[in-house]
Structures are given as structure tokens and as C-alpha cells.
Image (cartoon, rainbow, N blue to C red):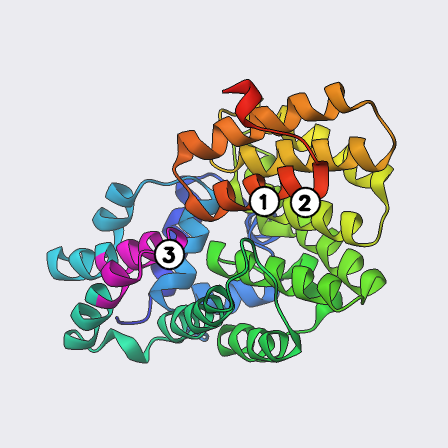
Amino acid sequence: MKAVSGVLIKELRQELNLSQELFAEKVAISTRHLSRIENNKVDIDVFYFINIMNIFEKSMADFWLLFLDSNEYRRYEMYDHLLYSFSKENWADFNTTISELKEDSMLDSPHIKQILAYAEIIKAETSRGSSLQDFNAYDLEKMYNAIKITIPDFEEENVSEYLLTQNEIYLIGDICDALAGLKQHKRAIKLAKALSKNKSIKARLSEDKGDYGYIYAVGSLIACYESAKMYNEALDEAIKLHKYCVKENELTSIDVYLESIASSYKSLGEEESFYKSYLIRSYHWAVLRGYERNIAYIERAAKEKYHVSLEDNM
């Protein structure tokens, strides 16, 4: 795909009636860098532009009218389908889409290369038989290599300032989980906090609209707190996230956060009937979603972690 003309960025900004300063702040770049983009002194690729469109919740129909011809739009749809297959871990569909992208020479895109690298990490982790993510030091190294495909100068302390795609948010969230699993708790929590405060995530939240990037980032923070045995902090974040998900009708991973509430309450010494109610709700949501890995995890956790029976409540 060709580079996006700076004229299109300028037209989008003017359509939104935003100054360069305010537009730059919302997309997490400097005003100087925006000026260079608008004057065609710096190229940005299609995927970067898509992320800017997503921040302002411009539809893909708008995107098509602004930039893509019919063939390019078809290629974007393949890219979008690749992300969907990856998120569902539907590897047969994922591999089919990769073959189609290869025919269109799209595999040279850094964003596609990143998805491929990320997918290999998840496949390797899954093959080890864990019910949920259980990354090792080798996975962590691979994750850093993957994030640097699209952000070559990636630094953890700058995460709140980056313009991030959804895939980059997920990848950094998994880096947090890997750090926590390797007992680097302070570093993991610091990174997860920075991710939840990322400028591109905050720009979408400022419009009072649901954003799964925010949900994933806070979910990573909760997991890091739990790993560090900071159960009060984990509980506070899990309850706030649960309320946010219900308010915004973002129910995709609500089973995960209900289980986090159950786990925190159990660790804080609450009565079984109390935390079990959250675990049961978590299980029902996982079944409703049909996500086998989460169902298997909750079933195992019920026996090994909570020592309760799910069958009594079916």
C-alpha cells in the first residue's frame, strides 16, 4: 500500500475543525511532526492513518472515500480479517488470509510482519498446554523484537506518548503479563500503568466512547497487581473496569474481569459464597462467549484455586 499524502491528514484535521496543536495532542505526536506530515516532508503508511481514523471514530466508508480505491479497500478488509482471525486464534483462517496477503505482496508491511511475529509467540505459548497465557523469558524477548518492528526506538518509559494500533496495545499488554510472570513486578506494573494512560487510548476515551484498547490495558494492570499479590489494588481496578464494560456495553472479555474480582475477594479473605458468585458469573460469560481457553481455565481454577464446584450452579 502506498504512503498517505499529508494533504489527507490536513483535510481530516480541518474537517474535524481542530487546530494543529489539538489534533497533534489527540494523536500523540508533536505539533512539529504533524506539520512535517501535512507538508509531505514525512511519509506515513496506511496503517498509521487507519489508527488516526480510529481515534476519531471515522468509519471505514469515510476512509474509503478519502483514500482507498476498490482494490486497496479489499486488501484492507483482508488485513482486518487477519486481525480478527488472530484475536480468535482461528489459525486455519489466519493461514488462509496470510496466503491471500502474500499474493498481494502485503507481507512486506511492518504491521503485517508484526502480526506474524506475534502470532508465532501465541502459538508457541498455546502449544505448551497452558489454559491462559503463561509466557517465558524467550517469549518476552520475542515480544520486544515484535514491537520494535513498528516502533524501532521503543522505550518502556515512553509508552504513554506513543500513537499505538490496537495490535500494539495487545502486544505491550502481553509484555506486561510476561514481566509479571517473570517476577519483575515493579517494572510490569509501571509499564501497565503507562499503557492504560497512553495518549491515543485517552483520546478515544475523551469522546466517552467504549475502547477495547483501554479495557485490555487495564486488564493487564489488574493481572500485574494480582501477580504482585496487591489484591486491594487489583480489586479496585477490576470493579472499575467491570462497571466501565457494562456502561459501554463492551462485554467481550467480561468473564476475565469477573474472575479477577472473584480472585481478589478470595485472596482478601471474603466468604466463599461471595467470591463464588463472581466466579459462577464469570463461567457463564465464558460459555456464552464460547472461548474454550477461558472456559478451561475457569473450570480448572474452580477445582485447584477456589475448591468449589461449578456443577452445583448449572
- The span from disc 3 to disc 2 (Cα, nearest Å) is 26 Å
Q: Secondary structure at mark 2?
A: helix
Viewer can see residue 222: yes
Callout 3 touching callout 2 (CB < 8 Å): no
Viewer can see residue 250: no
Identity of the amino acid at label 1? Arg
Segment tinted magenta in the rendering: 78-95
The residue lying toward the viewer, choosing from 227 and 287, is 287
Q: Which residue is mark 1?
A: 300
Callout 1 touching callout 2 (CB < 8 Å): yes
Closer to us: mark 3 or mark 1? 1
Residue drawn at x 27%, y 54% is 81
* Furthest residue in direction left, as rendered: 70
Identity of the amino acid at label 2? Glu
x and y percent of residue 121 in the render?
49, 71
Q: Would residue 147 be counted in the magenta stretch?
A: no
Identity of the amino acid at label 3? Glu
Residue 27, disc: none
**Prevailing SS of the magenta stretch:** helix
Q: Give neighbour class at mark 3: few <14, some 14-19, many 20+ (Cα, 10 Å).
A: some
Residue 89, disc: 3
Q: Which residue is mark 2?
A: 304
